[in-house]
Amino acid sequence: MIKKIDINNSKNAEDVLNIQMPSYKVEAEIIGSYEIPPLRDTVYTLQHCRETFFGYYENDVLCGVISIKIDDYDVDIHRLIVHPNHFRKGIAQLLLNFIETKCQIETIKVATGSKNIPAVRFYKKNGFRNIKEVIVNEQLSLTFFEKKL
């Protein structure tokens, strides 16, 4: 079941962090850089990020999260994370589908580490097109994607 998360509730923010940290550590290992800003998040930073959070729950246990910012008819995905214990169950797909069908939007934007091949494949498979690549430092570059609905 997917439902909105009240990130201002400290327990909910902790639950999101408990998904986010192991998920982004896997990405950090894939891309060879631990300079991913979400690995520095805290309950406080989550509560003040101005993102809207939705969670995928199995038996009342949070397994995956998507966070977005909406600007008119555009959605910017800031996080699409699944706990490693729940990889390969289609949870990321369910969360993306939820945003595509429940929000009145025309365009979805997202960025991921260029070396994060599973994420790059996921977005391409879902009809996103590569807009640009930004080199952050020697080890890290980001690929930006966009999808018109």
Image (cartoon, rainbow, N blue to C red):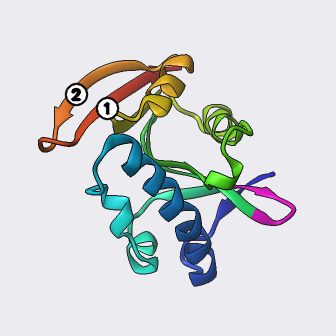
Magenta stretch: dominant secondary structure: strand
Considering only vertical position in the picture, is 51 above or below 76? below
Q: Picture coordinates of residue 113 (x, y %)? A: 33, 38
Question: Tag 1: residue type?
Answer: Ser
Between label 2 and label 1, give the one nearer the viewer: 1
Q: Which of the labelled discs sits on residue 99, or is there none? A: none
In terms of image quadrants, where is residue 92? Answer: top right
User: Pointer 1: residues within 10 angstroms few (<14), some, or many (20+)?
Assistant: some
The mark total stands at 2
Of the pair 20 and 99, the residue shown nearer to us: 20
Q: Residue at x 43, y 29 (%)?
A: 117
Pointers 2 and 1 in contact (C-beta within 8 Å): yes
- Residue 30 sits inside the magenta stretch: no
Q: Picture coordinates of residue 102 (x, y %)? A: 67, 38
> Is residue 67 shown left or right of residue 64?
left
> Is residue 32 shown left or right of residue 108?
left
Q: Picture coordinates of residue 68 (x, y %)? A: 48, 49
View extreme (left): residue:
138
Q: Residue at x 34, y 33 (%)?
A: 115
Considering only vertical position in the picture, is 102 above or below 13? above
User: What's drawn in magenta, residue-wise?
Assistant: 56-61
Q: Residue at x 61, y 32 (%)?
A: 100
Of the pair 111 and 71, the residue shown nearer to us: 111
Q: Earlier in the sequence, mark 2 or mark 1?
A: 1
Q: Which residue is mark 2?
A: 133
User: Pointer 2: residues within 10 angstroms few (<14), some, or many (20+)?
Assistant: some
Q: Which residue is mark 1?
A: 114
